[in-house]
Image: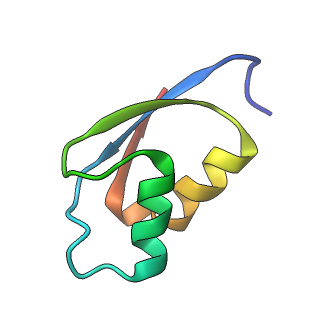
Amino acid sequence: MAKKNSKIKITLVKSLIGSTEKQRRVAKALGLTKKDQTVEHENTPVIMGMVNAIPHLLKVAE
């Protein structure tokens, strides 16, 4: 399990053009709308599940 209150930075590295509707919804739920946009979230199982749904579109840094 992740450390308490640890944060991760998530960057959208590929465009959402050509992705499925489900993938677009996951990206929007993470707060990502544009290419090269970065957001910071708590490292929780819910967030990691969303990241694992679209790993080919994202870059994750701790």
Front-most of 24 and 12? Answer: 24
Residue 48 position in % (x across, y down):
63, 48
Residue at the spot 64% in from the left edge and 19% down from the top edge: 6
Residue at the spot 64% in from the left edge and 32% down from the top edge: 43
Residue 40 position in % (x across, y down):
46, 28
Q: Indicate the colouring scheme.
A: rainbow
Quarter assignment of residue 60: top left
Quarter assignment of residue 37: top left
Tell me: residue 55, above or below residue 18. above
Residue 39 position in % (x across, y down):
39, 33
Spot the residue most to the top.
Answer: 5
Front-most of 33 and 58? Answer: 33
Can you say which quadrant of the picture contains the N terminus? top right
Residue at the spot 19% in from the left edge and 51% down from the top edge: 35
Q: Is residue 56 left or right of residue 3?
A: left
Quarter assignment of residue 57: bottom left
Q: How many marks?
A: 0
Tell me: residue 19, above or below residue 36. below
Residue at the spot 21% in from the left edge and 51% down from the top edge: 34
